[in-house]
Structure formats: structure tokens, C-alpha cells
Amino acid sequence: MNCIVCIACVPDTASVIKIGPDGKGIDESGIKWIVAPYDEYALEEALKITEAKGGEVTVVTFGPDRAESALRDCLARGAHKAIHVRGGEASLGDSFTIASVLAAAIKGLAYDLILVGVKGVGTDNAQVGQMLAELLGIPHVAGVLTLELGDGGLTAGRDVEGGREKVACPLPALLTCQKGLNEPRYAALKGIMAAKKKPVDKVEVSSLGIQEGVNPFYAVRSVALPPAKSAGTLIKGEDDPAGAAAQLVKLLRDEAKVI
Amino acid sequence: MAGILVFVEQRKGQIRAASLQAVSEARRLGVGEVSAVLPGSGVTGAAAALGAYGASKVFVADDPNLGLYSAEGYAEVVVKACGLAQPSAVLFGGTAMGRDLAPRVAARLGVGAIADATAITVEGDALVVTRPVYSGKAVATVDTAGKRPQVVSLRPNVFAAEQVGGSAEVVALDGLALSIRAVVKELLDTGGGELDVAEADIIVSGGRGIKGPENFGLIRDLAHALGGAVGASRAVVDAGWIEHKHQVGQTGKVVSPTLYVACGISGAIQHLAGMSSSKVIVAINKDPDAPIFKVADYGIVGDLFQVIPPMVDAIKALKA
């Protein structure tokens, strides 16, 4: 069973975000770039499936030069090969352009499953997976927490507000993977060494027939930090916790008017 | 092209709050006729009620195959309604369903989409959307670069649902050619009547300071007294004290409730990203230097085991 895993290379979640000089993006100095956390669940699931059933895992990303280190990380964890579509800086947040690029890169490949993270932790649209499935003409299940593979099909569980949907779906299909699906492995030293010899196919986005920035579907007008909060009211509750609790409830009712 | 089409979500015939919020916001935006599209099974009777929120027309796809959600089936219904209404924008409540469906619809229409709007302004007939990025560490103002219709999902509980009176014409959508491959076989109730953090107006979250999974009862007591949902920090989810669906933060849910109460949560940057846009933030923590106090509107420096029980009593007394 051949799996394709699409990943995004995003700022480490521990990063402090600062605004860049043009006011339309972030200041990238000092940012450490990582495989998006949810994409790790997608990769892990693909590795488990191919270990059990045979087949290969191909990792695909659309990003600038730095994304190669994210691909190498995936290869070190066990993926067989990688495709690096170079570009993407002009399409940050433009889910439809990103999905179109990925669809063009994937179209000719043989696959049974495409796995992606439920979202990146960058522009946070969480839309690329569904759009990619639609562009490739395959069904999808989003936010997958449980997965069973059968003959030619799968059963997946996904959480909705207050409930769990059980979805049956034929292959090929696309899954967006949620935290809880599995426990991602780390790269071992042996894997890191092996990854250096694995193939990374570099593709220019223009060779896929897409001119980035010419016909965008998402335009960023500005990016700013959230408004700073003024100092709050601090109640000392060490000596008289019950008194502090009563004072807080009174403030929430009379001043904040939220209860 | 003019007007706004709103996708309306229902569960067992009950229209979801996030959809009513989206219909109300569509009316407030005032860029032409507000229409709605409602797929489901046995839902025709629920359609007319949307008139009170400002929809003048409701397209209903009432079909046994649409009883449970299907991204493909529901996308077909929304695209069909789009063809009839020719809207300049299509809005979705940003629930699990809305966030899943909007991009599938957009791709079928050959346009982009914007998720998780927290504010919308109008320029001509174009919607300009404010939305959190980097899980709330920054805020972006974006549009769809002139593409129509504009597909936008709205963060739940940020936009008010308002009844303004009025009635809606109900139009049955028929001749649907439903092609459904991914089939929802069942929808299990796992909430046990508890509110989900993504939809809740009040959230009480517990962190490592609660010391053990057995003490989540204390967090639940406070959440129930306030009529809110139970949230959690990543640390306690990773420790297996509570399920991931409760996690608030960058690798959990990003929320904007009216009231957020953080109990025993120190406030890692990833957690702050997920909740700092809440309207009122309360922190209860032993450590006066905990970063959570920097974003809190009200804080108690103290032992949560001694503070929460009298708080629960005081709230219950207030509501009695």
C-alpha cells in the first residue's frame, strides 16, 4: 500500500512571533523551522501502514529551500523518498494555490492513501487537505483519530462537537490526521545517516504549470500582533482563600459582568 | 453576483448555534439578500425558523442520504444552492463540520477560502476578514484577491446570533446527483451532555497544578457551576489525565470564549496562543510569577484546592 504524506515546514511552536518589516508577514530571524506537529501523526500512520502491508511512503512538501531539512527529518524517520516542490513563499496562507501545486505534483504518482496533518500551525486555515482531495477527485476524512484498513477501503473515527463520527470510505482516499491517532517516532541516528542517501526529487513550481503570485486566491493586507492587555487585578489568596474566591466572584459579576 | 449564502448545520434536526451566528452576521454585513442552505433528512420543518435571523430564502436538501454529514454530499448541495443564489460570499459556522466542508466547497467552485474569521468588514461587496494566525500569536487581515464567491468560515461564539423577525421562503432543492464515497455510518454521542470547548462561551481549564487526573472533578465542578466546558493544558493531555479534545492551545483548540478560567496552568506560549483572545481571563495559580498572570484580567495567587471550592459555592449561591 503506497502512501503519500504532505507536510508543511512551520515555525517551532515555542517561537515568539514578531512582525516583519513589511507588516504583511512575520520576522523570520531566529525562527527554528520544524515539520508541522500534526503532520508527524500523518507520517507515523503512513510508516505503520507500509511496515504492516508493504509499499512505500513518499513525502511531499511545497516550500522554500529550508523545507528540505523537514523532508530529511521525515526520511530519517523512515519515509522512502521525498518530493520538494520549491517555492511557496508567495503563497503563504493561500490554501487553494498550495493544494493546486500539491495536486499537480501528486497526480502522476501511484498511491492508495494520502495523509496530511489536520492543520499546520502557521496560517492555520486547515484547508489544504480537503482541497487537495477535491482537486484529485478522491474522498477524504478530516481529523482522523482511529483508523482501520480493510480490503479496498477504510473505517475512520473523527471527533465532532460532543460526538464521534465513524466513517467508511473506499480507497484511494485522503486523511487529515489528528493528535491521538498514534505516537510519532523520533529519528534514530541510523535513520539520520540513511536519510542522507535517500532521494529528494526537486521540482520547480513553474514546471507544474503554476506561476506563483500571478493569480492568487488569498491576499494578506496586514499582519499585526494581538492588542496588548493592560495589567489585570491580582488578588492575594494565600492567607484567606475563601475571601479571595468571594472577591473574585463579585468582580466577575459586578465589574466584568460575565456571570 | 450579490448577496450572501450561509451553510446551515443541524444535528437531529436542531440547527447549530454557530449557523445562527453566521446567518446573523450575513444580515449585519448588509451586502444584499441573505439566503441559507440546509442539507439533512427530515429538516424541511426547521428551515422557516431561519427567517427570524435574517435569511429571506432557505434552500433545503431533504434527503435520507443527507441525514448524517458527508463532505461530498453536502458540498454538492451547497454548490447547487450557489448556482441558484449566485452569492458574492458563502459563510460557514466554523464547527468541525463547517471547517471541513468549506474548503471542499471552495475547491469545487475553483476558489480559495478563508477560515476562522473573528471580524469581517465590507469594502464594496468584498469581505475583508480578520483572523488569528500562528494560533493567535498574530492577527492577519486578508481577502480573497478578488475571487468570487468568497468562502469564509466564522469562529463560533465570536459573532452574535440575533433574532430580528422576518420570514423566509423555503425552496426545495431537488434533482441532486449525490455521489457519496466517504459515508458517515454512525454518530456516537461521546460528550455525555458536556459542552465542547470549541463551542463553549465559558471554559474552565486545568493544568499540571491540579496534581492528578482524579482532581479534574474540581475543574468540572467549577465548569458546571458556571455553565461552561472543561478545558486542559497540553501537559495534562500528554500525561493522559484527560482526552485531547479538551486541549486548549496551539496543538489543541484555539478558543475565544467570554470567560476563560485557567486553574493551575502556568501559561506556556503555546497555551497562551490558544486562549489569549478570550474576552475575560481569570488565572488561579500558586506561583505569582507564572506567565498566565500577564494575560489575566483577574488573578488569584493561591492554592487552587482551597480557592475553587468556595468559588463554586459562591457562584451557586449567586445563581440560586
Image (spheres, coloured by chain):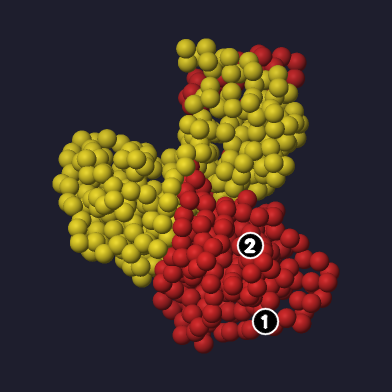
- Left/right placement of residue A68 relative to residue A24 reads right
Q: What element carries label 1?
A: strand
Kindly tell me whether residue B143 is visible in this rendering: no
Badge 2 marks a residue whose secondary structure is helix
The structure residue drawn at horizontal position 49% and vertical position 80%, both measured from the top left corner, is A107
Q: Where is residue A187 in the image (x, y as percent from the top left)?
A: 77, 66
Asked if badges 2 and 1 are on one and the same chain, I answer yes
Residue A20 rendering spot, x and y as whole percentages: 60, 63
Name the residue beneath numbered marker 1. Answer: A200
| Subunit under mark 1 | A
Number of numbered markers: 2
The yellow chain is: B
**What shade does chain A have?**
red
The tag earlier along the polypeptide, 2 or 1, is 2
Which quarter of the picture shows residue B210?
top right
Residue labelled with disc 2? A45
Type of amino acid at the residue the image marks with label 2: Glu
Q: How crowded is mark 2: few (under 14 residues within 10 Å), some or many (20 or more)?
A: many
Distance Cα–Cα, label 2 vs label 1: 21 Å
